[in-house]
Amino acid sequence: MARVPGIDVSYWDAGIDWPKVRATGQRFVFVKATEGITYKDSTFKFNWSGAKSAGLLRGAYHFFRCNVDAKKQADYFIDYVKSFKDDAELPHVLDLETNDGMTKEKIVPAAKVWLDRVETAFGKKPIIYSGQYFLQDYLVVAGGGPPAWAKDYPLWIAQYPNQYMEESKPFLPRGWFNWAFWQYSDKGVVNGINASVDMNVFNGTLEELYKFAGAKIPNQTPKTHTVKKGDSFESIANDYGVTVRELVMANPQLLVTGDKLTVPVAIAIPQESASSSTPTTGSTTGTSATAQRTYTVKAGDNLSIIAIKFGTTVAAIASANDLKNINNISVGQVLKIP
């Protein structure tokens, strides 16, 4: 059963080392862009460009607020994503999770307004993301099934089994018969991300994923790496964005300085991109390597910028400093950096 692994990320995953993420085998990512008509994810720029440089296929998603004008939400999303002048490979996503006190009679036509407007703007039918019960309760028409137009849109289903296995399948809502993506966990652990992350699979082969995205599979010509002192299979794999298993399968010999390795890289990662992912160190209290780091907030800072600077996450900083409001930090405030 062919499946391709991927993730989705947002503000709470700030500070991602994208080459390391790709080296774990992830091949696509959905990045949060907007929510309603008042929230733009401040990490979108970094995640969007970082994922591209590491060779992941990308799509952006909008968290839909059912009690807010759908046309305004679509335009808000379109304007923000287009402002980066960097086209997605995958279709964009309508994220349906909460009814915001609205009925299905209001939600169904509103969702279609957003879908139509975004399709017109980007030339691809968007993906619908939701859970089984939300779709059964709110994206339904008389008779209990989904609207007739729903079958025209790829489905990204959120459903978390106790244990995910390759032969597992998600339960689909009534009236839905196919799925394109499955978010099977919200507690994934991925090298390069210092927080729990949503884990997904594409229902098909890598070739089929590229076809779905309307993108060409990159040049498969292997690269050559000359082993340097201090190199390891893991460090080389991280630099080139391949898995350790792929690298070892291509080079079963022991590492010897000066030897040339075959790197079966699908998409080349510039060395400067790989090296620039090293987190900037900050001030510490004490002398040991495990001492508590601190950072004094400067003008223009926010938690996202600080997380990226230190290679940690917004969630981790907020937890370490017992911050109730992640948008409320002040110049001169001293933060503990986990």
Image (cartoon, grey):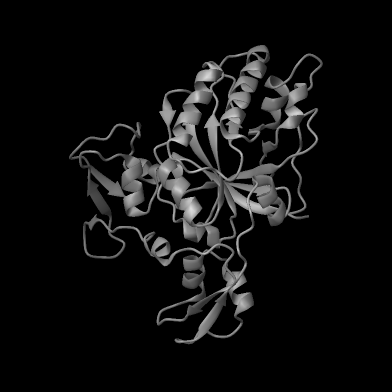
Observer able to see residue 192: no
Q: Quadrant of residue 142?
A: top right
Q: Residue, x 78% and y 23% (percent of image)? A: 148
Q: Position of residue 259 (x, y in %)?
A: 50, 86
Left or right: residue 169 compared with residue 282: right
Measuring from the top left, give residue 135's x and y in whole percent: 70, 26
- Residue furthest out toward the left: 332
Left/right placement of residue 73 relative to residue 277 reads right
Left or right: where 71 falls relative to 283: right
- Res. 73 in view: yes
Looking at the picture, how far across and down is residue 1, in whole percent?
A: 78, 55
**Which residue is painted at 44% across and 77% down in the image?**
231
At a point 75% along the width and 21% down the height, the residue shown is 147
Q: Nearest the camera: 223 or 291?
A: 223
Q: How many numbered discs?
A: 0
Q: Using the image as rendered, state which of residue 143 and residue 127 is in the foreground.
A: 127
**Which sits in the foreground, 211 or 54?**
211
Q: Residue at x 46, y 81 (%)?
A: 227
Q: Is residue 12 above or below residue 265?
A: above
Q: Position of residue 187 (x, y in %)?
A: 56, 46
Q: Nearer the viewer, residue 288 or 242?
A: 242
Task: Tell me if residue 22 comes above or below residue 110 in the rendering.
Answer: below
